[in-house]
């Protein structure tokens, strides 16, 4: 049975609330949330998803960089489920690049993000993982991690001039 969910849209309260840590990775509840997130993300052209985007206030994200019509230049990686994720920047350098969000359709914006980060999370086997992420994948991680703290990418935009229509963004490729 499934499991594909509607994506919460900007204005939904859940997108502005701090998500709660997951205690028991092996619980049926958490297993089902992850399945729903995987099915929901697979049905879109997104490269990441956070549980609040399917209206679940839990600290779970999926990072799934892949080239799609939405992100033609994205590197390909296996979709990775990250539970209770955290990160530290490895350098203070931030880089502006384009982001969009399934919860905010129709627009794109340039967002400054750390280029090089060290990430910790619990995986679906309940093992603690630590890995270094760079560039676009680091960007996706920071975007999704923000969702767990009730933030969206527009909160990080430096100037409104960096916000454009998706139809204009697509002309760039
Ligand atoms: Zn988003």
Image (spheres, rainbow, N blue to C red):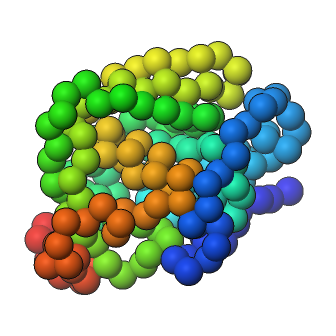
27 lies left or right of 39? right
Residue 25, x across and y down, in percent: 76, 30
Residue at x-position 32% and y-position 78%: 107
**In the image, is residue 93 above or below residue 95?**
above
Q: Nearer the viewer, residue 157 or 123?
A: 157
Quadrant for the N terminus in the image: bottom right
The answer to whether 23 appears left or right of 152 in the picture is right
- How many marks on residues? 0
Q: Residue 160 lies in what quarter of the image? A: bottom left
Q: Which of 36 and 98 is in front in this view?
A: 98
Image location (x, y in percent) of residue 18 = 61, 54
**Location of residue 11 with respect to 151 vertically, above or below:** below
Query: In the rendering, at what x and y percent does residue 134 appear?
Result: 26, 32
Q: Residue at x 25, y 66 (%)?
A: 157
Task: Name the residue rendered at 62%, 34% in the picture.
Answer: 83
> Residue 93 location in percent, x, y?
14, 37
Q: Is residue 60 above or below residue 10?
A: above
Q: Say left or right for 164 vs 120.
A: left
> Can the viewer see residue 69?
no
Q: Is residue 1 left or right of residue 165?
A: right
- Quadrant location of the C terminus in the rendered image: bottom left
Q: Which quadrant holds residue 118?
A: top left
At x 40% / y 52%, what residue is drawn?
143
Q: Can residue 80 be seen in this view?
A: yes
Towards the viewer: 54 or 67 = 54
Q: Is 54 located above or below residue 64 in the figure?
A: below
């Amino acid at each position: 049975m499934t499991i594909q969910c509607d994506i919460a849209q900007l204005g939904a309260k859940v997108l502005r609330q701090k998500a709660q840590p997951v205690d028991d990775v092996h619980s049926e509840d958490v297993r089902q949330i992850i399945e729903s997130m995987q099915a929901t993300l697979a049905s879109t052209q997104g490269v990441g998803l956070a549980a609040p985007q399917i209206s679940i206030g839990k600290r779970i994200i999926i990072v799934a960089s892949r080239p799609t019509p939405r992100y033609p230049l994205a590197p390909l990686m296996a979709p990775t489920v990250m539970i209770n994720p955290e990160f530290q920047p490895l350098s203070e350098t931030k880089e502006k690049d384009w982001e969009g969000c399934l919860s905010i359709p129709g627009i794109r914006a340039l967002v400054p993000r750390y280029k090089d980060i060290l990430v910790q999370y619990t995986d679906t086997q309940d093992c603690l993982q630590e890995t270094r992420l760079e560039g676009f994948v680091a960007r996706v991680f920071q975007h999704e991690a923000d969702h767990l703290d009730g933030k969206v990418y527009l909160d990080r935009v430096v100037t409104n001039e960096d916000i454009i229509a998706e139809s204009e963004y697509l002309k760039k490729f």
